[in-house]
Amino acid sequence: MPPELAPRGVDLLLRKLLNHSLLSTDDQNAIAALPFTRRRLDPGSIIIREGERCDICPILLAGFAYRHKMTGDGGRQIVALKLPGDPLDFQSLYLGRADHTVQTLTSVELAIVPNRELERLIMARSSLARAVVVDIVIEASIGREWLLNIGRRNALARLAHLICEIHHRLAISATSLVESDLPITQEQLADLLGLTPVHINRTLKELERAGAILRNGRRIRIGDLDRLCDLADFSDLYLHAHEAPDDRNVRKGG
């Protein structure tokens, strides 16, 4: 692996973990030393398949991916959206088989870390073990908010809330939906929000009329973030960002 490839992958993972956990300089250096291989995949590629054992933890460097579950008759529900900086399968450190499928939404770039290397670190370093658990717990928190979103919010608030969430989570990779487009089709939004593509199209038009989003063909970006947050009744509490004070994120020692 060329040495110039290493910093990008670990930088994003470190930024993600430091957003919610305290890690010493030694802990951060240990993450930086993790071996990984880089891989690029096209849209629609399977990264992890339900029912299979997984001995790797892919870290998303660029692009979008998602977790989904399928019904017996082929219906799909997207249950989690993964953004740059997200580890895609911390669960396999603790569970034997995947209970869901992880698939690429767009073209993606991955850093593939062997689970045995992660296990070695978290067994030796309690702060890193805690950071991994906190990341899993935050994903569960996001899942609870998605359940509320699908179960209790109307279509307008549901879609507005999702766009707000993606915008806030993209801060990890220093991007935003004010400056870049949302790379999700109306069909994918329908599977994600439990609506039909026709309903998604109508709702996007409502958000556009309200000035909350801007559209150019199939491309969507935020036009007025405050307006969008108002329509969604959005609070980022469930994202648990910045749980660790900035001045304690980097400490000396182990």
Image (spheres, helix red, strand yellow):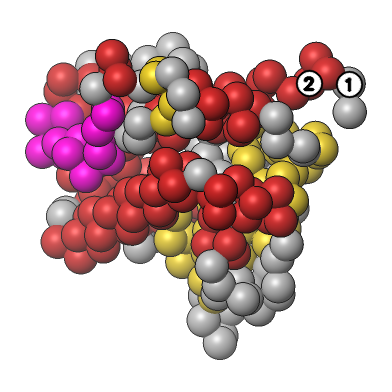
Q: In this figure, which residue is indicated by the disc labeled 1?
A: 2
- Quadrant location, the N terminus: top right
The answer to whether mark 1 and mark 2 are in CB contact below 8 A is yes
> Image point 65% across, 51% down: which residue?
120
What amino acid is at disc 2?
Answer: Leu
Q: Nearer the viewer, residue 78 or 37?
A: 37
State which quadrant residue 115 falls in: bottom right
Q: Is residue 2 above or below residue 130?
A: above
Q: Please name the residue shown 56% across and 87% down the image.
A: 72
Residue sitting at 17 percent across and 29 percent down? Answer: 229
Quick check: 184 left or right of 202? right
Residue 5 is marked as 2
Q: Position of residue 181 (x, y in %)?
A: 49, 23
Dividing the picture into quadrants, the one containing residue 98 is: bottom right
Q: Which residues are magenta?
A: 229-244
Residue 38 within the segment the image draws in magenta:
no
Secondary structure beneath label 2: helix
Amino acid type at image mark 1:
Pro
Q: Position of residue 3 (x, y in %)?
A: 83, 18
